[in-house]
Image (spheres, grey):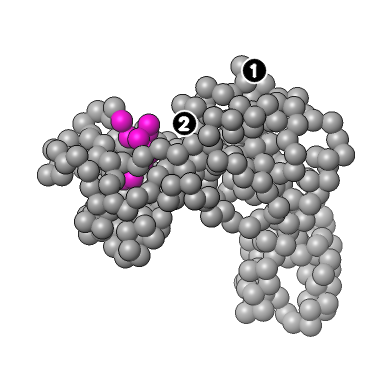
Amino acid sequence: MDPHLLRTYVTVARLASFSEAARTLGYTQSAVSQHIAALEQDLGAPLLTRRPVAPTAAGERLLEHAGPLLLRLDAARADVVRMAGAPEPGLTLAAAPTALGPLAVAALPAVGVTVRVMARDGIPAAVATGTADLGLVDGLAAPSDPLRLPDVAPLTTHGVSEEPVCVLLPDTHPLARRTGLRLADLADARWLDASDAGLPLAQLRAAGGGHGFRPALRYEGTDVRVLTALSAAGHGLTLLPLTAAGGVPGAVAVPVTEPRVVHRTELVCAGAPRGAAARLVEVLVGRM
């Protein structure tokens, strides 16, 4: 299957327009039509309806495969370029909001660094495709257990830190004076759904028995300060690492005592890091 044709198909399906896809890809509309026709002939099935432009059932199935296939191709290209070329000056670090803790911040070089805070699910792909030199991801885990990351490319991970996790709740909350909390006892509480800023509710469900943890409010953003302000105002509970949960005005951070889980941060890299990236890996991994 020609990846150029596949990329054209994905663009047309995403934009629902042959003309918009042509502008995005820098092709003529006729060339885009020819790409789609050639791919349909190769697969022996219609992939798009024309009016309106939308994937057929076969086209929907192809889209399920297309994303991972194109990502692996981009990752392969980036990996070869990385090996063949000289290390780029400076460093681009992609990090989940709660993965960029005090240790990581203190280890950053004094100059030449770009920090890109983004959703944790996109960080492995950013490293694999070369848009970031290194990534910092985090999540709930049993002590010393590695995180489960999406299989986007051959990547190397290193443990960076583990710290306690806390439930953040308003200081007027009935549980605010507790010295510890069991996640299972909070399954029916009001929770904030903020998978890009805090720890995803899906991880809480997995740790707390696989049920409950219904969202009362959804926050789509990566600013941890907004998340903690929402929790302090009573819009819902959230789970955060101790360093992010402490000292929030109007809120109390109560440690999770059961199950025995920690907030784990890992460094993600592709191949053998060089230059500033290699030095940061050495500093961060040496502290674990």
Left or right of 19? Residue 56 is: left
Residue at horizontal 56%, vertical 24%?
Answer: 107
Residue named by callout 2: 101
Residues shaded magenta = 238-246
Residue 216's place in the image compared with 110, above or below, is: below
Q: Residue furthest top?
A: 110
x, y (%) of residue 120? 52, 46
Q: Secondary structure at mark 2?
A: loop
Q: Which mark is residue 111?
A: 1
> Circles 1 and 2: CB distance less than 8 Å?
no
Closer to us: mark 1 or mark 2? 2
Residue at horizontal 59%, vertical 30%?
Answer: 286
Q: Disc 1 marks which amino acid?
A: Val
Q: Earlier in the sequence, mark 1 or mark 2?
A: 2
Residue sitting nearer the eye, 179 or 232: 179
Residue sitting nearer the eye, 28 or 264: 264
x, y (%) of residue 204? 36, 55
Residue sitting nearer the eye, 47 or 166: 166
* 169 in the magenta segment: no
Residue neighbourhood size for the residue with mark 2, other residues' Cα within 10 Å, grouped as few (<14), some (14–19), many (≥20): some
Disc 1 from disc 2: Cα separation: 19 Å
Residue neighbourhood size for the residue with mark 1, other residues' Cα within 10 Å, grouped as few (<14), some (14–19), many (≥20): few
Q: Quadrant of the N terminus?
A: bottom right
Q: Disc 2 marks which amino acid?
A: Gly
x, y (%) of residue 153? 70, 54
Residue sitting nearer the eye, 154 or 66: 154
* Residue 222 visible in rendering: no
Residue at horizontal 49%, vertical 36%?
Answer: 161
Residue 63's place in the image compared with 151, above or below, is: below
Left or right of 14? Residue 121 is: left
Quarter location, residue 53: bottom right
